[in-house]
Amino acid sequence: MSSALLTHPRFVGHELPGHPESPERMRAIWHSLKQTGISDRMIQVTPTPASDEAILRAHSPEFLALLQRVSREYPQQIVMLDQDTWLAPGSLQVARLAAGACLHAVDIVLTGEADNALVVARPPGHHACPGAAMGFCLFGNVAMAAQHACAVHGLESVMIVDLDVHHGNGSQDILYSDGRVGFLSIHQSPLYPGTGAALETGAGPGSGYTANIPLRAGHGDASYRALFESLLWPLARRWQPQLVLVSLGFDAHHADPLANMRLTLAGYDWMVRELLALAQDHCDSRVVFVLEGGYQLEVLAHGVQNLAHRLLGEEGFSDPFDNGNLRTRSDSQDVIERIRRVHAI
């Protein structure tokens, strides 16, 4: 299989010293892909920044004007947009580039230039709301990519699978009334940002196209496997996507410092294989994986390395963590039954 890798040296140019969403995340991934030779086997693509037109499909003109004004008036300062989201010198340009990488990845996959694509970019995007930056995120990268697939390529059905441990409230808000995009999120709850209840299912033309699966802390590989088999596959059959976009956060791993889930890298690997199979069954294998969160550098390095192997059709796998004494919850069936009732599955 051919796989496109979209990343850029400028993705380290957005920094708040001491913050967990740091440039070191990019460096750890780049080093891993280069050291193993995987990146040399991928189609390396240099992305271009997202245009105002693309940004304004997802965000309000007032929000874009605010970011432009802050960048212009404070060119040498770090400005906090909320308690944990910032604009540093050059951040707006980096965020445009991260969003543009997602749009470009969609173009590559839908035109057949590559079988699939991997976007290794920052800042992440799934918390960015139509009118506000939030949760380390400036632009709604994956939501914008879904809108781009519909507006530019004429797709009528796109599926987003959000596996970041935090609910993708921004992606949900941007797409909540859009019946062309099915949004499924599996996330720890309660946890930041406090959204993503099972009864949040969409509005208007988008009614039934948002599926939230909130989990208590402590669920691991077995729970996610059950959720995929009982909920994700049936929803995919209902939505019939022509493209699958994956917001992949590695912060549901048991070693991540910002959450309390119990996935292993083998669990992530199984989910990636399932998503590739789902895309093969529904949309001629057209799938784009986009990095969201994940704040333990070894997890990121090995997780993305394993993912890239799968995108290339290779069998390599690496996990340096001791998972032997990992204790996980085993009550996912209650969650499954609830979601089945909400969505009449």
Image: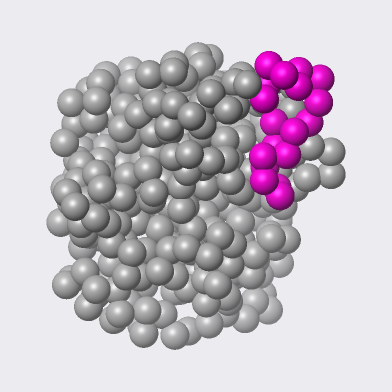
Q: Considering the image in quadrants, where does the C terminus appear?
A: bottom left
Q: Residue shown at 75%/47% (left/top)? A: 20
Q: Residue shown at 52%/77% (left/top)? A: 216
Place residue 196 in its image quadrant. bottom left
Place residue 91 in its image quadrant. top right
Q: Position of residue 261 (x, y in %)?
A: 59, 69
Left or right: 74, with 336 as reference point: right
Q: Position of residue 279 (x, y in %)?
A: 27, 44
Q: Is residue 18 magenta?
A: no
First to last magenta residue range: 70-87
77 vs 72: above or below: below
248 vs 118: above or below: below
Q: Is residue 35 visible?
A: no
240 vs 259: above or below: above
Left or right: 31, with 341 as reference point: right
Left or right: 24, with 183 as reference point: right
> What's the image's color scheme?
one colour
Q: Is residue 74 magenta?
A: yes
Q: Residue shown at 81%/20% (left/top)? A: 76
Left or right: 116, with 237 as reference point: right
Q: Residue shown at 31%/50% (left/top)? A: 176
**In front here: 41 or 10?**
10
Work out which residue is located at the far right of the displayed protein and give it. 18
Q: Position of residue 48 (x, y in %)?
A: 50, 14
Q: Considering the image in quadrants, where does the N terminus appear?
A: top left
Count of numbered circles in the view: 0
Q: Is residue 79 visible?
A: yes
Q: Position of residue 198 (x, y in %)?
A: 35, 70
Place residue 327 in its image quadrant. bottom right
